[in-house]
Image (cartoon, grey):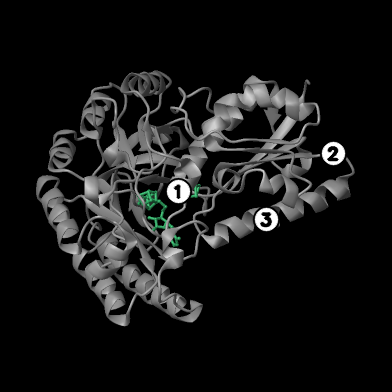
Amino acid sequence: MDNRTFYIRTYGCQMNESDSERISGTLIDNGYSMVATPDEADLVVLNTCSIREGAENKVYSDLGRLRILEAERGTPMQVAVAGCVAQQEGEKILSRDRSVDLVFGSRAIGKLPEMLPRLEAGERFAELNVHTRPDEPGTHVRADGHRAFVTIMEGCDNHCAFCVVPATRGPEVSRRPEGIVAEVEQLAAEGYVEVTLLGQNVTSYGKGLDTDFADLLTRIHAIPGIRRIRYTTSHPKDFSDRLIDTLADCPKVVRHLHLPLQSGSDAVLARMGRGYTVAEYRRKIDRVRAKVPGIAITTDMIVGFPGETDADHQATLRAVREIGYFNLYGFKYSRRPGTTALTLDGHLDDEVRSARLIELLALQKEITLERHASLVGQTREVLVEGESKRNASRLSGRLEENVLVHFEGDPEWIGTVRPVRITEATVSALIGEVH
Ligand code: SAH
Ligand code: SF4
Ligand code: F3S
């Protein structure tokens, strides 16, 4: 079929964003063109997330809105549900919602070219394939011409008691390093200056392949043209001394580490099945700070995990204060289907979970402001990303530490690295000037 249009909406993490870029590229390769609103689309793809209840509910309410939109406009709209809710619910989505035509999992994206003719012929079906090796990258439609996501692995072999990801993304499989290096070389040739290496647990990259994440970083570091290498997410249990030495040896690997702690209480960490204690985590932080001075550390924290006492919560606040994170993502524990945390005693009321989250976020806000204020007066390299979202006469970019900076400048600088003097700090960003 010619001239079909599609619209894609992405929920969830950067891995989903990267998958959406690949879904878009595949659709374009197969004769589709991308449109900016669902209203104009023959095919709407929802690339879904099921990490917390809220994310999942949003998908179902968006499906409801699409049904109304289709009825109002009076022309048929096909709907595909991809991503983690697709993988979790599978065929059930087709029976629960008659407006859904196709359900496909993240490891079935490579099969899209075979699925499309069936979809266009009016077949309703699900394609869920969780056990293949991640395919080579395929065509991506990247949101930005200078910064790119590169998926290095799929899935997760850990069993954190709260988490659906091992069920939705399947077991951990690493891409071969040669394919990753070739993709980054190609990106550099196209003018990309920053890559973010993605995986649920990049620190255990290379299982079954006779390589590891430190080796991969070293190989990518050697690629000319790439100026910044980001990576996410690291797991404290696999964050090794060898990797810390590699971070210290590779200056293009940014001085930013996202290392989810999840709780400041050993009792809670043990019930979560995270595989480390707070003291072990802190020893790794001390070591990385000693070897990579000035490294900015951010984290994820869950409050209100089943059985979390007030003392456990205080231990979390204490850890946050003592470690001095640049920033954190704080979440209220959310019950997820099929997870072992459902069977634990001591599930807490929403009131308690909400109050703990408010307290945690307020504390972090103070610390973030202190961290940002400590940068005032310094002249730092900023990778210019684009025009500022709030004020089009300004540009914005990021420090290595992943902190946003706004400043006056020439739009021609977008995609280059500029020295910027930091003049002002807020919780959300810095203000600076270029001399
Ligand atoms: N693979 C990454 C992150 C996975 S999801 C890691 O291991 O760190 C991102 C974050 O969502 C997690 O770090 C956790 O803080 C949060 N999260 C996951 N499941 C959750 C749940 N059931 N309730 C609340 N937060 C959750
Ligand atoms: Fe989920 Fe834990 Fe795997 Fe992260 S490491 S994706 S939190 S199971
Ligand atoms: Fe969500 Fe799946 Fe990512 S559950 S956070 S989209 S791995």
Q: Quadrant of the N terminus?
A: top right
Which class describes the residues within 10 Å of circle 2: few (<14), some (14-19), or many (20+)? Answer: few
In the rendered image, residue 188, in percent from the top left (x then y), is placed at 37, 22
Please state which of residues 154 and 288 is positioned toward the viewer in this rendering.
Answer: 154
Report the residue marked by disc 2: 76
Q: Secondary structure at mark 3?
A: helix
In the rendered image, residue 361, in percent from the top left (x then y), is placed at 38, 70
Q: Is mark 1 within 8 Å of ligand 2?
A: yes
Of the numbered discs 2 and 1, the one sitting upstream in the chain is 2
Report the residue marked by disc 3: 60
Of the numbered discs 3 and 2, the one sitting upstream in the chain is 3
Q: Quadrant of the C terminus?
A: top left
Mark-to-mark CA distance, 3 and 2: 19 Å
Q: Which mark is residue 247?
A: none
Report the residue marked by disc 1: 165
In this picture, residue 377 sits left or right of residue 34: left
